[in-house]
Amino acid sequence: MIGLQKAFARAKTSAGPRTLGLSTVSHQRKLHKGSTNMDGNSNFPGVIKKAWKQTGIQRLQTCIRISVVARLSRQVLEERKFARQVCPMHQKSLLSVLALVFLCQGKVAAQIITVKTVGGRTVECMHTGLRSTVKDCGIHANWYNYVFVGLISKVTPLDNDEKEIQIAPEEVFWGESTTSVNVVTSQANCMHELKAGDKWLFYLRKGNPIVLDYYANDSVPFSDAQEQIATLRQLKANGDAGILRGRVLTQSAGKQGVPNAQVVAIRQPKGEQFARVTGPDGRYEFEPLPVGTYKVVVRPIGSYQPDDDEINLLGGSCIDLTLSRSPHAWITGNVNRSDGTPVPNLGVVLIRSDNSWYMTTQTDESGKFTFDSQDPGEYVLGLNYPARADWFDGGGAGAGVKVPPASLFYPGVSDRSNAHIIQLASDEKLDKIDFVVPLP
């Protein structure tokens, strides 16, 4: 759940270039409070030794662990120094870097590094770009152990420009009530100024000490947190009920809000129904709903039918659910040799006819391939047959994107200019795009 640390500006290692597969987490997945270890108890030297022996993606993943420990540990400065010995990713010259890296769960996250001047000195600020697909109305309460509005009563300077902050909680939304909380900062120079007498909405995790970290923390000054506070107060007043809100959008590229759409939440398994109508901007919000699993549908709007969704609404939770329509067209086919035997594990590429987008897949054991959830348009289909050494897998989009060099194009020509242009309509299912290739 916590994001990542050092920007991987030098992510090209001896393993060579890789295609990073992107995946997301369903919005139903709950991020449990207290899931982040803030204790700083780790065998850091052992991790360092491990990283020295690794190369490529393995070393990259270990460096993620090193950086997370370094950021969240009490010995933050000393451990960052160790990390830089084996993770050559520190570049002060970068003004703004967005780096993609793996998480162990298969997610891909991003982080942003900026450089600012504070008191005549150059300061590097690192903040996670990780965005969970858990649509919790922007309150992030379940990411933390303590969520409260508090008054800063005392600020004590520490070494390396960090600070110890004494906070008096005034309005507690999550966690234990207490009269005073002490926290230490990490990257204090990168935060809003923390002054005695200021009021903030604090999001904190357990730890020894508790760390208020610029890198992965949602704490904000009280004046900037009015929307979150209003939702937190509403959830507290609702008790065991939950909030379901969101927006209905068009399928068009602009994704405009759809007004006057009827949104229905159907509680499973008995089918109890709750309905709301979207406003001018396409937004909707139900009255507090009882906990449970809901199928959420939008009644047809003329010929437009947004996709259904399903949520698990917990007591005291808020879900912001966007309802739209994903592409439903697909292209599927088979690759067989001239003697009728299938060609398994063969690279196949689907390319927009204007070269602005591509995606690869592989045939299965029966020689079948499928490209689903496609937008309507004109496409060219290619095979890596005969296999080429410069073939690569993945996907890409944009002007000048490099496309995998197919050897054969549908319906069986080697020159792309003679390839058949596949016309794919909205929601169309083309299931007989077959290749017959010569015997090797």
Image (tube, grey):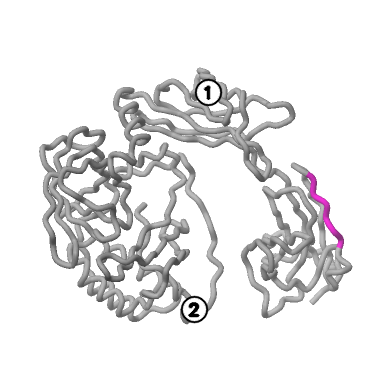
In this picture, which residue range is highlighted in magenta?
420-425
Is 364 drawn above or below residue 132 in the view shown? below
Residue at the image position 68 percent from the left and 65 percent from the top: 399
Q: Is residue 361 visible in this depiction of the protein?
A: no
Q: Between residue 272 and residue 318, name the one nearer to us.
A: 318
Q: Which residue is mark 1?
A: 266
Q: Name the N-terminal-most of marks 1 and 2.
A: 2
Mark 1–mark 2 distance (CA, rounded to whole Å): 50 Å
Q: Between residue 118 and residue 297, name the one nearer to us.
A: 118
Secondary structure, mark 1, is strand
Residue 222 is tagged as none
Report whether 50 appears left or right of 206.
Answer: right
Amino acid beneath label 1: Ile
Amino acid beneath label 2: Ala
Residue at the image position 36 percent from the left and 74 percent from the top: 92
Q: Which residue is mark 2?
A: 15
Q: Position of residue 213 (x, y in %)?
A: 26, 55
